[in-house]
Image: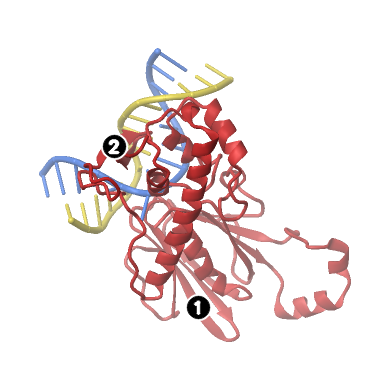
Chain colours: A red, B blue, C yellow
Amino acid sequence: MPELPEVEVVRRELAKLRGGTIVRFESNDARIVDQRIDVVGRVVREVGRRGKWLRIALDRRTRSAERGASGGDSRGHRGAEPLDRGTVLVFSHLGMTGDWSLHAPDEPALRFERVRIDVRRARRITSARYTDARRFGRLVTSATDIDAWRELGPDPLLEGIDERHLLEVMQKRRRTVKEVLMDQSLLAGVGNILAIEALFAARIDPRSPSRSITARDVHAIASALRTIIRRTIAHDEALLEGRRSRSPFRIYGRAKSPCPRCGAALRQVVLGGRTTTFCASCQR
DNA sequence: CGGCATGTTGCGCA
DNA sequence: TTGCGCAACATGCC
């Protein structure tokens, strides 16, 4: 499930819980869950995402306290109060096979279910279930942002892609262009598939040394990324809503098939330990 | 049975 | 110190 578009679709789903109060939290798996703070009784204020990480902000405000606060003057003094004392953050990374989905509270545990968080909103309880077959995912509660979150680079959807900065880093590193693209501290959320597809759309050979990348290349990559991210989100949302939708991926997983653009056989190599599909004849 | 998998981390070595 | 390559993690699926 896990590159930027998939995680964004999960975020939008979990955002339906905003305003609700957590009434139950359960997990069996200490490998995935690092729970340092109790979250039961807290209110879901905001569901955010940066790259492949989700961040759910909880506060301790109850309904009556909220009414009291808005009537008082504490807000005026504190402005937007992004992370006041008492806020608890839940970080979730989906690893390779993680996913969140919303269910009725009486629904039996799903296959591979590792965590459940039940949220009450207006007398209705929604049960958010986290499933993860391979258990590479993580769920951490913390009072402050965790290192993994702080170390993420700009998110292409939230902050856009800074082409000048991207070019600068490409010039500096001694890696292939694909490996640099997948560096989460440079650009958060670009995984193996997005990198493969963006380089194909930009007609750039993924094996190219990043130092050989030009401003024009960076521009092509950036606009390809924007397009693929947008299409993949639309695709994933369609599937979630039960609509039919054709996969936006053109070459991922299709080594040996003919290139959809020029017909040459697609090739496969390993870069940075990751399988990489490309067309040697139309990607330079 | 063998091989592969949308991710991250940590270790050994240059 | 830095950076690279690669194994490891745990399990399902083709």
For label 2, the SS is loop
Upstream in sequence: badge 1 or badge 2: 1
Residue A125 place in picture, x, y as percent: 52, 81
Viewport quadrant of the C terminus of chain A: top left
Q: Is the residue at mark 1 from the same chain as the one at mark 2?
A: yes
The residue singled out by tag 1 in the image is A126
Q: Chain of mark 2?
A: A
Image vertical order of residue A213 relative to residue A241, above or below: above
Give the farthest residue toward the front. A262
Q: Chain of mark 1?
A: A
Circle 2 crowding by C-alpha within 10 Å: few under 14, some 14–19, many from 20: some
Viewport quadrant of the N terminus of chain A: bottom left
Q: Position of A127 compared to A246: left or right?
A: right
Residue in the picture at 78% in, 80% down: A67
For label 1, the SS is strand
Residue A231 found in image quarter: bottom left
Is residue A33 at least partly visible in the picture? no
Is residue A126 at least partly visible in the picture? yes
Residue C3 place in picture, x, y as percent: 48, 24
**Closer mark to the observer between disc 1 and disc 2:** 2
The residue singled out by tag 2 in the image is A281
Q: Position of A75 compared to A183: left or right?
A: right
